[in-house]
Each structure stands twice: as C-alpha cells, then as structure tokens.
Amino acid sequence: MKEIFEWERFLMNELPFKFLLEVIVRSTIMFVFLLIALRVTGKRGVRQLSVFETVIIIALGSAAGDPMFYEDVGIIPALVVFTTIIILYRFVTWLTGKNEWFEKLIEGKTVCLIHEGRFSISAFKKETLAQDEFFSELRVKSIEHLGQVRSAYLEPSGEVSVFFYHDDEVKYGLPLLPDLYQSKSKKIFKDGLYACAFCGNVENLPSGAAVCPVCNRDEWVVAIKTLRLS
C-alpha cells in the first residue's frame, strides 16, 4: 500500500532520471504540435491572444494541472516540462524578433478584407472566416452597409480593424442588416443600383438577370447609402 509523501514517488514517480530526457522531447513535440494546430484553425479561434501566446498558456496549464491531481505524475518531470516550455518560449520570441519570415509564420500577418467598400475575395478564400460571422462583426461596430467602409483588416490577434469614409465620401454599398440582405435575388425587378450579395460590388443594373463582373455571382441586393450614426 502506498504511503503519502513517499519522496521517490513524489519527485519522480519511481521513474529513472534519464526519463527526464524523454520528457524534454515529449514537451517539444507537443509544443510544436499545439502551435501548428492552433495556427491551422485560424485567428478567430484565439481572439485577443496570438497563436503563440495561446500555445504557451495551454502547455503551461497542462504541465501545472497534471501533477496537482494525478499521483502517477511526478513533480520533477512537470518542472522539466515547465522549464522546456519556457526555454522554447524564449527561443521562439528571440527568433521572431530576428527573422521577419518566421514572425509571419508564427503570428500570421494582417489581411485586408474590405477595400474601397468591397470585399477582398482572395483574402476570404485564405482565411477561415465565414461571411455571416464577418457581417456580425461589422454590425457590432454600427456599420449598416459596405459603402461606409474604406477598408477593414483582420489583425494577427483575430480582431477586425475598420477605417471609415467621411460622411461626404460615403457611397452606395451592400447592406449588412439581415432583413435587407435576405432580400437578395437573382432577378432584378427594377432598374437601379444593386450590390453583389457575395463581393459587395455595386452596379447600375437594368431589370432582368445579371452576373457580377468581379466575382461572377448572380445574386443582388438593392444598394443603400445611409450615413453612420455617431
């Protein structure tokens, strides 16, 4: 029967000290795996923290939690895990400061999602960001239509930065309000200004059917030109 405070079990769980070398290798493998996994899942999953910072938090939390609850996890291996993670953190931080390519690989880069009141289609294909999710993000910032937006950027932190037109520069744009956007149709019932429901491109269209010259989609919404409310 095991006794509490058996120091050999408490410190190393009766494992040989050479097992610490395996702990270092395991920690490194899991650290790299976490970094890759969170990088692949996209920025929006780790908002306000960089992917790298999230990896550190998860790794340190796991290393701290296991020896607190499980008697078969020794304190010394857990401390070695901590030390390995901190060394890796210091190394990666140093490397990102020295190498711009590596910094972009780890942290990601700023991506332009809206330019001159229209979606950057190529950027949306690269990012794991759904259009509905982005619409919601813009509505939270009191944006009624894309014609109010000069440009918008997805930052490495997952936040969206928005820059607006002045009131006298606002133009017709794709409405973001659900009741207006859901009225999209493949048929134009009346001549006028319409915004492509996919990319936000605005065209003066006659009644009938039309294909967007920018994205080749055929669904349209009546474009609006309201000013932002202060």
Image (cartoon, rainbow, N blue to C red):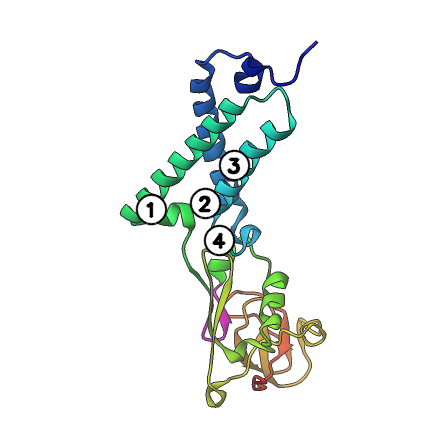
Q: Are marks 1 and 2 in contact (CB under 8 Å)?
A: yes
Magenta-tinted stretch:
114-120
- 3 or 2: tag closer to the N-terminus: 2
Q: Give the distance between the C-alpha atoms of the residues marked 1 and 2, in whole angstroms.
A: 11 Å
Q: Name which residue type carries label 4.
A: Lys
Q: Quadrant of residue 156?
A: bottom left
Residue 78 in magenta?
Answer: no
Relative vertical location of residue 164 with respect to residue 128 in this rendering, above or below: below
Q: Give the distance between the C-alpha atoms of the residues marked 4 and 3, in whole angstroms.
A: 28 Å
As drawn, the label of residue 126 is 4
- The residue beneath circle 1 is 96
Q: Are marks 2 and 4 in contact (CB under 8 Å)?
A: no
Percent across and percent down for residue 181 are 67, 73
Q: Give the distance between the C-alpha atoms of the residues marked 2 and 4, in whole angstroms.
A: 20 Å
Q: Which is in the foreground here, disc 2 or disc 4?
A: 2
Q: Name which residue type carries label 1.
A: Thr
Q: Name which residue type carries label 3.
A: Ala
Q: Secondary structure at mark 3?
A: helix
- The residue beneath circle 3 is 59
Alpha-carbon neighbours of circle 2 within 10 Å: few (<14), some, or many (≥20)? many
**Depth check: 122 or 140 in front?**
140
Percent across and percent down for residue 52 are 45, 45
Q: Residue furthest bottom?
A: 168
Q: Quadrant of residue 47?
A: bottom right
**Depth check: 204 or 76 in front?**
76
Percent across and percent down for residue 203 are 53, 79
Q: Give the distance between the C-alpha atoms of the residues marked 3 and 2, in whole angstroms.
A: 11 Å
As drawn, the label of residue 52 is 2
Give me the residue at 31% from left, 43% from top: 94
Give me the residue at 55% from left, 34% from top: 64
